[in-house]
Amino acid sequence: MEKCYVESVLQSELEDKLDLILRNAKTVRDRRSKSSYLKVGTGFDIETSRINVGEDAYAYCYHWQFGIGGVSFMGRSLSSMVYFMKVTKEYIHWNKPKSKLLVLDANLGYEWQFCKKYWIKMGISDLFAKEKRDPIYIEVADTFRFREVLGLFGHSLAEIAQNYCGME
């Protein structure tokens, strides 16, 4: 998988990479929601850590990545994630009007806790959750539809790997 460190490339380079991936992407229309999604594999993940200071514990995100069509776009700060999402949104709205990216996430509830304030500022278009911290899907900026993958399968990640990939 090709890697693209968002913080070390110019906006024009980022747009060129997105263009190579998305230019020929077909769209699939969802009959129920009437939305059109770009037919390209897309996933999202963050890496976090926790530090203890006296009696207090603090968690922080030190890495994020979007995998889109075989390219891993990544960064070290959530503000660079917002920048990437804005550039991607702009590209899609100009070149693939009314299309959205379906972004699969293995633990959306966890990512939501770290990304919530950034995504709310970008605009939550739609959200459905089983409980307060357990979203099934979140649509951000009318462009990115994050879907909880484990909720779709109804199994743990280990069970999915065993059942569908023959792995443990």
Image: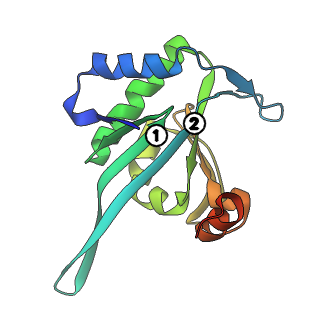
Determine contact: label 1, label 2, CB under 8 Å. Answer: yes
Q: Residue 155 at what x, y percent from top left?
A: 69, 68
Q: In which quarter of the image is residue 125?
A: top right
Q: What x and y, as percent, mark residue 167?
A: 60, 65
Q: Where is residue 151 in the image (x, y as percent from the top left)?
A: 68, 61
Q: Which quadrant of the rendered structure holds the N terminus?
A: top left
Extreme front residue here?
A: 166
Residue 131 visible from this viewpoint: no
Find residue 93 and report its horizontal and vertical position in percent.
52, 18
Read off the residue under disc 2: 41
* Rendering quarter of residue 73: top left
* Residue 121 is at least partly visible in this image: yes
**Element under disc 1:** strand
Looking at the rendered structure, the secondary structure element under dot 2 is loop
Q: How crowded is mark 2: few (under 14 residues within 10 Å), some or many (20 or more)?
A: some
Q: Please, is residue 32 above or below residue 159 in the view?
A: above
145 to the left or right of 67: right
Residue holding disc 1: 67
Quadrant placement of the C terminus: bottom right
**Real-space Cα separation, disc 1 to disc 2, in angstroms:** 8 Å
